Image (spheres, helix red, strand yellow):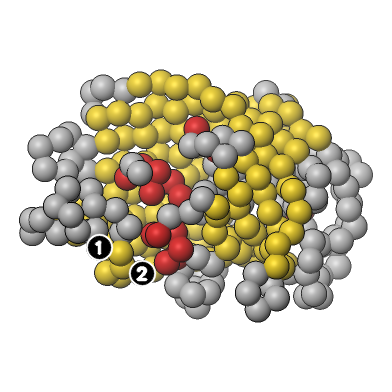
Amino acid sequence: MTVQLLLRSTVIAAGLLGSAPLSSGPAPTQAAEGGQTIAQSADYFPDTIGTRWQYRGQVSEGPLQTIENKYFSNVSTVTGTRTLKGGLVVTVFHDTNPGNHGPSDSFYRRDAAGVVYYGSEPGTPLERQLTPYQIIRFPMKVSQSFQQFNRTDIDFGSDIDGDGTNEHVDVEGLSTVMGQESITVPAGTYPDAVRVEARMSLKIRLSSVDRTAVGTDVMTAWFAKGVGLVKYIERQELAALKDDRGNITDITEELEEVSVKSTLGLQGRDETAPEGLLADDTRNQKLLHVVFAPGLGPDAR
């Protein structure tokens, strides 16, 4: 498994929800207080069973100065729910080819406090040490940020220097609501989309030499009310290992089509939601999910 795929699978991603990014639970860290509150924040992250979204995507990757472009498509569908240990019910998103990495299922839970990512199948050893973690907090506020996870000296799950021993890594994730702006994709123009940035940093300690390799994954995603994720741009960078020149991967997915299923209730939740959280938006019945994560994160993928 490539380092880039390991990076990808841990982003909120989103990696945010779907596609879209902690320790044994949502990190108990302080959030940077934001400015303007975005009304009905939950409406930007619909998760109705049977809803289907189609994306077109592009991947540019390779060592520095040698970039290969690839094009792909990805269809995301909310397929149902799953009950985890302890009776917790999560929503299942199936993606046919998120980020051009092949099919996967991702698990999310949306309630009055926000959206939490519970991992994916197939996942990675690194991801399993980070999940579950929160990818969005409600209500969203412009310029609000919070730490999603911060783990030190955990198993990277891969031997990237070829000495027969898995590396260890320090990894930190941060999510920030940047603001609202207009975004145009093949599915249309959304004038008040919320832009979210998910930033993950990794310090990988090579076991064969006294050296640390630095990796970063930055995902910028746009979410429209009643629609969900309409576009994300992700850049993954890995510093040079041994004699190579390092590696950069850019991934973009844009919404092409949506098939809407409407509902009045949150999927499998027993929390009391604030007024307006569950209401259908008759002005815009297009739905989508988040990428951070496999993915800040439709993933978000």
Relative side of 228 to 298, left or right: right
Locate the C terminus by quadrant. top right
- Nearest to the observer: residue 299 or residue 139: 299
What residue is drawn where x is 67% and y is 23%?
186
> What is the count of numbered marks?
2
Query: Which is more foreground, mark 1 or mark 2?
Result: 1
> How far across and how far down the image is residue 264, in percent?
90, 57
Q: Mark 1 or mark 2, which has the lower sequence index? A: 2
C-alpha gap between disc 1 and disc 2: 11 Å
What residue is drawn where x is 68% and y is 54%?
92
The relative height of residue 252 versus residue 213 in the rendered view (above or below) is: above
Residue type at the position of mark 2: Arg
Query: In this rendering, does residue 144 appear at all?
Result: no
Q: Are marks 1 and 2 in contact (CB under 8 Å)?
A: no
Residue type at the position of mark 1: His
Locate the N terminus by quadrant. top left
Relative side of 74 to 216, left or right: right
Query: In this rendering, does residue 209 appear at all?
Result: yes
- Nearest to the observer: residue 258 or residue 123: 123
The relative height of residue 287 versus residue 157 in the rendered view (above or below) is: above
> How far across and how far down the image is residue 113, in percent?
68, 70
Relative side of 248 to 79, left or right: left
The relative height of residue 131 versus residue 159 in the rendered view (above or below) is: below
What residue is drawn where x is 27% and y is 69%?
153
- Nearest to the observer: residue 158 or residue 110: 158
Q: Which residue is mark 1?
A: 168
Q: Which residue is mark 2?
A: 151
